[in-house]
Image (tube, helix red, strand yellow):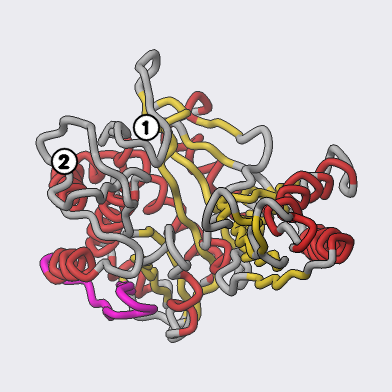
Amino acid sequence: MDILKSVENIYPQAVEWRRHLHAHPELSGQEVETSKYICSILDELGISYKAEIGGHGVVAQIGHGNKAIGIRADIDALPVSEDTGLDYSSVNPGIMHACGHDMHAAILLGTGALLKEIEEEIDAMDGAIKLFFQPAEEGIGGAQPMINDGCMENPKVERVIALHVDPSNDLGTVVLKYGAMNAQTQGFRLKVIGKSCHGAHPEGGIDAIVMASEMVTALQTIPSRYNAPTTPCIVTVGTFHGGNAGNIVAGEVEMTGTLRALESSVMDRNKELFEQISSGIASAYGGSIELTWDDDFYPALINDDQVTSLIEECTRELFGEEALRFMPEPSLGGDDFAFFNSLVPGSYFNIGTTPVGEEWYSLHNEHYAPKEEAMKTGIAIEVTVGLKLLKEICK
């Protein structure tokens, strides 16, 4: 197969698929029509699949062998009101594919279309390539539910890859990161309990707002004083709610937020410090806390060196040295692809979407409009890397 020529041939269809998905976005956990549309395209392509995996996820498969490679694309959208002016802008008010998941899904459909053309070659290797169309990446996380529903088994997936669009890099580039790429994330809900009273007589109560305000400040010493400056970690208080009236000392405050770190040992220690600091402040004032850790945490995303090296090699072969970029440092953003590549060796990479010199908007922005030509890069890399990984595990 002439990969680049085949990509050019499938590209108009990928554009059509992407524009339909972009115009009909659905939020995390609500991807009913998105899933149906993906299944309809798979039917047209003659690719076998199973739907309703981990919620509204779809697992497609090319090849019938005993060893498999997994390629993942997320499919959910964001609660953002689109302001791009595109002819195919979202028809669903307040919902937009502002993170490029429409492109991820269209790229994976294009990858599937090209791999289907050489299914006999895949069967000859006694291999299979699975396509994971994953829901709820922006919400509670759809990767683990898909894993729980068996997407990594029968046949067993031994390597995984995934990509993400990246407006901060030039169109046509492939952006790699060896080792740690994204953080472990841990959400929290902290209730600070005091005693309400009349605002004219504060001595009769225990001011929950005063306690909680001190906690917000003191908790920032976890990354700044309890961890070395070279240890990436974050404590963010994202919401703060308390009080009912201006003349009442608040008896209760509730805060929510997130802890992030690149290492599990750092996260565990920071969680201990978080509880120690917040309970200590509450105790000093005569109050108390109720601390709840969210169940929907993401592990750190650690890329496998060998898989990443293969992506680097394929990028160089397809597009030349000038297409390669490397992330200088990890991101403390989270992505539940980490659940997949914590089970088997895998790698997550970005593809640039902005022509050189053009203005660009960040992900999750109402103006974000990536250049669709980036899908050519994504399809070419996914097909090439998928096949090479399959050859390696089927030796």
Which image quarter: residue 220? Answer: top right
Q: Gap in Å between the C-alphas at discs 2 and 1?
A: 18 Å
Q: Is residue 16 above or below residue 229?
A: below
- The front one of 379 and 191 is 191
Q: Which mark is residue 89?
A: 2
Check contact, mark 2 vs mark 1: CB within 8 A: no
Three-letter amino acid code of the residue under disc 1: Thr
> What secondary structure is the stretch in magenta mostly built from?
strand
Badge 2 density bin: few <14, some 14–19, many ≥20, Cα 10 Å: many
Using residue 226 as the reference point, say whether residue 73 is left or right of it.
left
Q: Position of residue 387 (x, y in %)?
A: 42, 59
Three-letter amino acid code of the residue under disc 2: Ser
Residue holding disc 1: 353
Q: Residue at x 84, y 66 (%)?
A: 286
- The front one of 368 and 218 is 218
Bounds of the magenta segment: 44-61
- The front one of 29 and 176 is 29
Q: Which mark is residue 187?
A: none
Badge 1 density bin: few <14, some 14–19, many ≥20, Cα 10 Å: many
Q: Residue at x 26, y 42 (%)?
A: 81
Can residue 49 be found in the magenta stretch?
yes
